[in-house]
Image (cartoon, grey):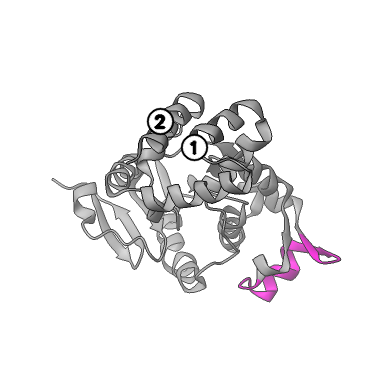
Amino acid sequence: MDQDYHQFIVQIKQKTGIDLSLYKEAQMKRRLTSLYQKKGFSSFKEFYAGILADSQILNEFLDRMTINVTEFFRNHKRWEVLEQKILPRLLANKKKLKIWSAASSTGEEPYTISMILSKYIPLNHISILATDIDEQVLAAAQAGIYSERSLAEIPSSLLSKFFQKEGNIYKINEEVKKTVDFRKLNLLGDPFGQNFDLIVCRNVLIYFTEEAKEELYKKFSTSLADGGVLFVGSTEQIFNPRQYELEVEDTFFYRKVNIL
């Protein structure tokens, strides 16, 4: 690792608590180099000075290092498994589920969970924690305003029931918005809650090093209640779930088990 980038990693961790060394270096370095060149800097040293001097540059840095490509019902076949297999099992044992959408980006994922869950229980009985490291995307999620592109996979029955179209945008209704509590959280640095029945963390872990992924799987497993489920993305299959006290319940769904 070159000295310029290494020093940048140290400084960013001191300033923000974000440890860039836990992200795949080539991908992150390429993404951030593209940003600093666009802003007129010629090195990570200059870029960090710019971050200190201008909060807007800091916000752009945070936005670039987080991955905010998302949509409702992304990989919809997996959501069908959640609706038809996972949620009925979880709801057979309790009337209210403790759910966490980790790295929730602009809100499509937790709102998708809420709409699916509303088929089983009333919206006013649903409470979902949704977290992300990026305050800007959290603000967008709380606003609940989406383009048509984000809604391409959503079933028409849910679109008409839960969204209001205004020109070229769609607003999610207030009842659904009230089911989700958005909070800032750094997956790689902050402590996790406990006793979750469902943790959804999709299409984020692929950007982390293998060591960081292993640490996260351990933390997610510890945060699950017995029988709780971790739902990961389509490129994030866990090949050795037993070492995290997990077992495969379906493709990309892992159930917490007590392994004696």
Residue 72: give x, y in percent of width and height: 60, 64
Q: Is residue 211 visible?
A: yes
Between marks 1 and 2, how big is the CA–CA gap?
Answer: 8 Å
Label at residue 133: none
Q: Residue 120: within the magenta? A: no
Q: Is residue 188 visible?
A: no
**Element assignment for label 1:** helix
Residue to which mark 2 is pinned: 7
Residues drawn in magenta: 152-170
Q: Quadrant of residue 136?
A: top right
Q: Residue furthest top?
A: 14
Q: Quadrant of residue 173?
A: bottom right
Q: Which of the marked residues, 1 or 2, is nearer the chain's N terminus? A: 2
Name the amino acid type tagged 1.
Phe
All told, the count of numbered labels is 2
| Quadrant including the N terminus | top left
Which residue is rendered at x = 61% and y = 35% of the image?
Answer: 58
| Quadrant including the C terminus | top left
State yes or no: discs 1 and 2 in contact (Cβ < 8 Å). yes
Residue 97 in the image: above or below residue 15: below
